[in-house]
């Protein structure tokens, strides 16, 4: 999985552990040091990523980049739409609103922290999430998040409603496909027995009416 | 021995009737799972075919209760009816596929 990891220096955030963990599992391009919105724009324009990962300060209004610049929700959503990036991971405090906006404006999914995060804790969910994505959940962000998150409400997974609507439509379509019906062994045996019984009865009836027996 | 009692006249109709019966059972099973209306039409069509071939088999036996001459017109009419029912089922299936393609199935 290709990840653009945005971790500006000098903001009092120690993202070293987080960056190292994520780099262990995936193809990571990192933006360190002084990071501006233009740096992110150029990185996203040059290469297509699966995830934009922000390891910085955050809040309802946006995430903090270098020199006090705040990257707001719409700008992040524009970066997402630029190359159809699937997901956004906000490893930053109080980013529920940003994640929700991104999931409604281009991203398939976004993970946010609903609480204030300490540097000592912030890397843990990201490490677990990306680890699970590497180990059997490459395209299953829901499964990876379910395994990584302990459900205490500190983190949230925001999912695109359009994507869910598409899934529902596909599921409804699949339900009308005859071979999509699932059959247990017990049911198969029951139906086979019933059909064999009816077949035997029909054979006897036809043989009798035809005068064979 | 008349034309309808020639070699395999009875056996082929019997096997076809059994095949149609098993097809009906499968469509019934699928309908119970999906509740798609077109499957009921196809189920009825296959049951009609089962009856059609059963009548042919009966009237092709060595001592038929129903002689072929007595039921010929009724069997032909049944054949036409069954063909229409199966065609209607297929049309309904295509309509369902079109609805799925338009995305208004949910």
Image (tube, coloured by chain):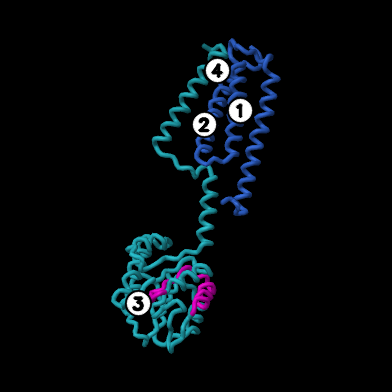
Circle 4 crowding by C-alpha within 10 Å: few under 14, some 14–19, many from 20: many
Mark 3 burial class by Cα count in 10 Å: few <14, some 14-19, many 20+: many
Check the residue under mark 4 and report the chain it is in.
A
Q: Secondary structure at mark 4?
A: helix
Q: Colour of chain B?
A: blue
Q: Which mark sits nearer the N-terminus, 3 or 4?
A: 3
Q: Are marks 3 and 4 on the same chain?
A: yes
- On the image, numbered disc 4 is attached to which residue? A206
- Chain hosting mark 2: B
Extreme residue toward the left, this view: A120
Q: Where is residue B46 drawn, in percent x and y? A: 59, 30
- Tag 1, which chain? B
x and y percentages locating residue A122 in the rendered image:
33, 74
Query: For the residue carrying disc 2, how many other residues have a C-alpha within 10 Å: few (<14), some (14-19), or many (20+)?
Result: many
Tell me if residue B5 comes above or below residue A70 in the rendering: above
State the mark number for residue A19: 3
Which label sits in the foreground, 1 or 2?
2
Question: In the image, residue B72 lies at what x, y percent?
Answer: 69, 18
- Structural distance between the alpha carbons of marks 2 and 3: 60 Å
State the extent of the magenta-drawn residues as a range: A72-94
Q: How many callouts does the rendering have? A: 4
Q: Which mark is residue B49?
A: 1
Q: Distance of mark 1 from mark 4, alpha carbons? A: 14 Å
């Amino acid at each position: 999985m290709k990840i653009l990891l945005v971790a500006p220096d000098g903001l009092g955030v120690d993202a070293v552990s987080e960056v190292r963990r994520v780099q262990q599992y995936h193809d990571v391009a990192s933006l360190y040091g002084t990071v501006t919105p233009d740096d992110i724009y150029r990185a996203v324009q040059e290469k297509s990523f699966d995830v934009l990962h922000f390891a910085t300060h955050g809040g309802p209004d946006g995430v903090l980049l270098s020199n006090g610049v705040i990257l707001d929700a719409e700008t992040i959503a524009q970066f997402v739409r630029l190359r159809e990036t699937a997901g956004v991971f906000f490893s930053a405090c109080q980013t529920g609103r940003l994640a929700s906006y991104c999931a409604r404006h281009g991203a398939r999914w976004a993970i946010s922290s609903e609480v204030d995060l300490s540097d000592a804790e912030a890397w843990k969910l990201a490490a677990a999430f990306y680890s699970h994505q590497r180990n059997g959940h490459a395209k299953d962000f829901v499964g990876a998040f379910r395994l990584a998150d302990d459900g205490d409400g500190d983190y949230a997974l925001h999912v695109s409603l359009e994507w869910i609507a598409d899934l529902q439509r596909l599921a409804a379509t699949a339900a009308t496909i005859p071979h999509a019906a699932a059959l247990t062994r017990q049911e198969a045996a029951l139906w086979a027995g019933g059909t064999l019984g009816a077949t035997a009865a029909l054979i006897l009836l036809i043989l009798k009416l035809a005068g064979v027996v | 021995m008349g034309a309808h009692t020639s070699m395999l006249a009875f056996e082929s109709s019997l096997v076809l009737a059994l095949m149609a019966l098993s097809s009906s059972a499968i469509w019934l099973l699928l309908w119970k799972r999906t509740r798609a209306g077109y499957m009921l039409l196809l189920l009825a069509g296959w049951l009609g075919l089962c009856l059609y071939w059963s009548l042919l088999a009966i009237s092709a036996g060595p001592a038929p209760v129903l002689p072929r001459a007595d039921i010929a017109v009724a069997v032909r009419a049944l054949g036409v009816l069954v063909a229409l029912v199966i065609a209607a089922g297929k049309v309904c299936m295509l309509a369902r596929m079109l609805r799925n393609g338009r995305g208004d199935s949910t």
